[in-house]
């Protein structure tokens, strides 16, 4: 086996090949569009918001603290069926990501 070269894990590129901020903005757009859709929109939107929070927190929690806070509030609003406010918070978070 000495002829086998191990370079590291294989598999799909992280975030589908997109950079992290573009991926996060796209995910928040999707969440905003589906949050009040019947048939699972709320579930998928809150899951998407949670995924973005985790990725930003893993990348640099200090840098993204304000965005993570907005996303936590958006998640809470969505679960309480405050869809207008949830969308507003998602837009604010997305705008902050655009300025980064």
Image (tube, rainbow, N blue to C red):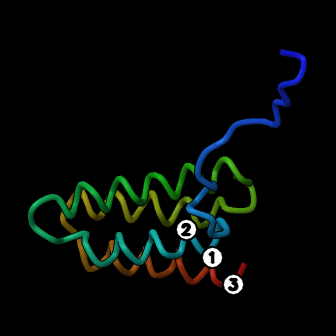
Q: Is residue 59 above or below residue 5?
A: below
Marks 1 & 2, CB-CB < 8 Å contact: yes
Residue furthest toward the right?
Answer: 2
Q: Which residue is mark 2?
A: 24
Secondary structure type for disc 3: helix
Q: At x 18% / y 65%, what residue is drawn?
A: 81
* Of the two numbered discs 2 and 3 in the rendering, the one whose residue sits closer to the viewer: 2
**Circle 3 Cα neighbour tier, 10 Å, few/some/many (<14 / 14–19 / ≥20):** few
**Quarter containing the C terminus:** bottom right
Q: Which residue is mark 1?
A: 97
**Circle 2 Cα neighbour tier, 10 Å, few/some/many (<14 / 14–19 / ≥20):** many
Q: Quadrant of residue 10?
A: top right
Q: At x 24% / y 73%, what residue is drawn?
A: 83
Q: For this view, does 72 lie left or right of residue 1?
A: left
Q: Is residue 73 above or below residue 2?
A: below
Q: At x 70% / y 37%, what residue is drawn?
A: 9
Q: At x 34% / y 78%, what residue is drawn?
A: 87
Q: Is residue 1 above or below residue 37?
A: above
* Residue 33 x %, y %: 29, 78
**Quarter containing the N terminus:** top right
Secondary structure type for disc 1: helix
Q: For this view, does 95 lie left or right of residue 74?
A: right
Marks 1 & 3, CB-CB < 8 Å contact: yes
How far apart are the two marked residues, 1 and 2, measured between alpha carbons?
Answer: 8 Å
Secondary structure type for disc 2: helix
* Residue 48 x %, y %: 40, 58
Q: Which residue is mark 3?
A: 99
How far apart are the two marked residues, 2 and 3, measured between alpha carbons?
Answer: 13 Å
How far apart are the two marked residues, 1 and 3, measured between alpha carbons?
Answer: 5 Å
**Circle 1 Cα neighbour tier, 10 Å, few/some/many (<14 / 14–19 / ≥20):** some
Disc number at residue 61? none
């Amino acid at each position: 086996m000495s002829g086998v070269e191990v370079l590291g894990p294989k598999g799909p590129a992280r975030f589908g090949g997109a950079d992290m901020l573009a991926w996060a903005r796209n995910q928040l757009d999707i969440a905003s569009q589906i949050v009040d859709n019947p048939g699972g929109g709320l579930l998928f939107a809150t899951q998407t918001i949670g995924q973005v929070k985790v990725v930003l927190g893993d990348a640099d929690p200090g840098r993204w603290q304000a965005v993570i806070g907005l996303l936590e509030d958006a998640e809470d609003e969505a679960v309480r069926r405050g869809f207008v406010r949830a969308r507003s918070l998602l837009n604010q978070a997305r705008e902050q990501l655009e300025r980064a």
